[in-house]
Image (cartoon, rainbow, N blue to C red):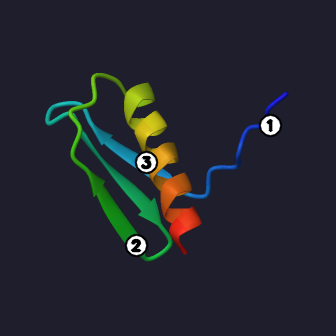
Amino acid sequence: MRSKAKTNFNLIFDPISKSALIHTGDRVIWLAGPFATYRDAMSAAARSMTSSATKR
């Protein structure tokens, strides 16, 4: 069984432009989208944070 990863970022979703921002400490990352829902944006943010963590 997979354990859920702890989210160490805040997601700011804009439903009008269908884009999102990831806020982590002093960094802000823009996700272009378009994302239909907050859940889609959160899923993309989690993938982005996972891939950026493995690159470090």
Determine which residue is flagged by label 2: 27
Label 3 packing within 10 angstroms: few (<14), some (14-19), many (20+): many
What is the C-alpha distance between the residues marked 3 and 2? 12 Å
Q: Tell me which corner region of the image, top left, top right, bottom left or bottom right, holds residue 53.
A: bottom right
What residue is drawn where x is 21% and y is 46%?
32
Query: For mark 2, does the 10 Å Cα neighbourhood hold few (<14), some (14 to 19), or many (20 or more) residues?
Result: few
User: In the picture, which quadrant includes the N terminus?
Assistant: top right
The structure residue drawn at horizontal position 49% and vertical position 63%, both measured from the top left corner, is 52
In depth, the one of 11 and 53 nearer the eye is 53
Element class at badge 3: strand
Residue positioned most to the top: 36
Q: Residues within 10 Å of mark 1 (few under 14, many from 20)?
A: few
Q: Which of the 4 image quarters holds residue 35?
A: top left
Q: Which residue is mark 1?
A: 3
Residue farthest toward the right in the current orientation of the protein: 1
User: As shown in the figure, which amino acid type bears the numbered disc 2?
Assistant: Arg
From the image, tell me which residue sits under label 3: 11
Circle 1 sits in a helix, a strand or a loop, which is it?
A: loop
Among the two numbered marks 2 and 1 on one chain, the one whose residue lies closer to the N terminus = 1
Q: Amino acid at mark 3?
A: Leu
Q: Identify the mark nearer the N-term, 3 or 2.
A: 3
Above or below: residue 55 compared with residue 22: below
Q: Earlier in the sequence, mark 3 or mark 1?
A: 1
Residue in the picture at 15% in, 31% down: 16
